[in-house]
Image (cartoon, rainbow, N blue to C red):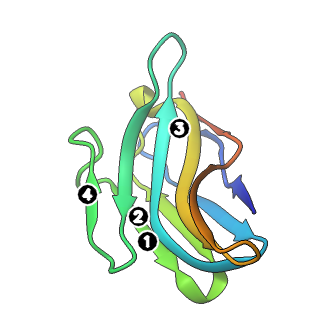
Amino acid sequence: VQLQASGGGSVQPGGYLRLSCAASGSILSINAVSWYRQAPGKQRELVARITSGGSTNYADSVKGRFTISRDNAKNTGYLQMNNLKPEDTAVYYCNADITTTGPFRTANYWGQGTLVTVSS
């Protein structure tokens, strides 16, 4: 199984970006999907999470600005980021609990990071 994150880039404050996280491989089902971020010199932190049932939770710092979603048919998760601020600058990582076939098991997977830079 692989998670491929994309959509990062450089934007000005107040701008927006949409991150995508596509899962591929022998996937039976994708459970929770999460986005984390790590800014320079800081620990990785949870930004948003969505369960298989669609329940969501967000870090206080992004509530009202970021929206996490998923398309189960495409095995893809998204993070819509609006009204971006300089403090949102970080490498963003997607994470998912995935149940695979052959062998049948559930494990946690990380995608590679995608850099988001918010600067004027």
Q: Nearer the viewer, mark 4 or mark 3?
A: 4
Residue at image coords 68%, 67%: 22
Q: CA distance from mark 2 to mark 3?
A: 21 Å
- Name the residue tied to disc 2: 68
Looking at the rendered structure, the kind of residue marked 1 is Ser
Residue at the image position 42 percent from the left and 43 percent from the top: 84
What residue does disc 3 label? 12
Q: CA distance from mark 2 to mark 4?
A: 9 Å
- How far apart, in angstroms, are the residues tagged by discs 3 and 1? 24 Å
Q: Earlier in the sequence, mark 4 or mark 3?
A: 3
What residue does disc 4 label? 57
Percent x, y of residue 103: 73, 72
Q: Residue at x 49, y 75 (%)?
A: 70
**Farthest-out residue, top:** 41
Give the alpha-carbon distance from disc 4 to disc 1, as whole Å.
Answer: 11 Å
Q: Which residue is mark 1?
A: 69
Kindly report which numbered mark, 3 or 1, lies closer to the viewer in this rendering: 1
Verify CB contact (< 8 Å) between mark 2 and mark 1. yes
As drawn, 105 above or below 84: below
| Sooner in the amino-acid sequence: mark 2 or mark 3 | 3
Q: Amino acid at mark 4?
A: Asn
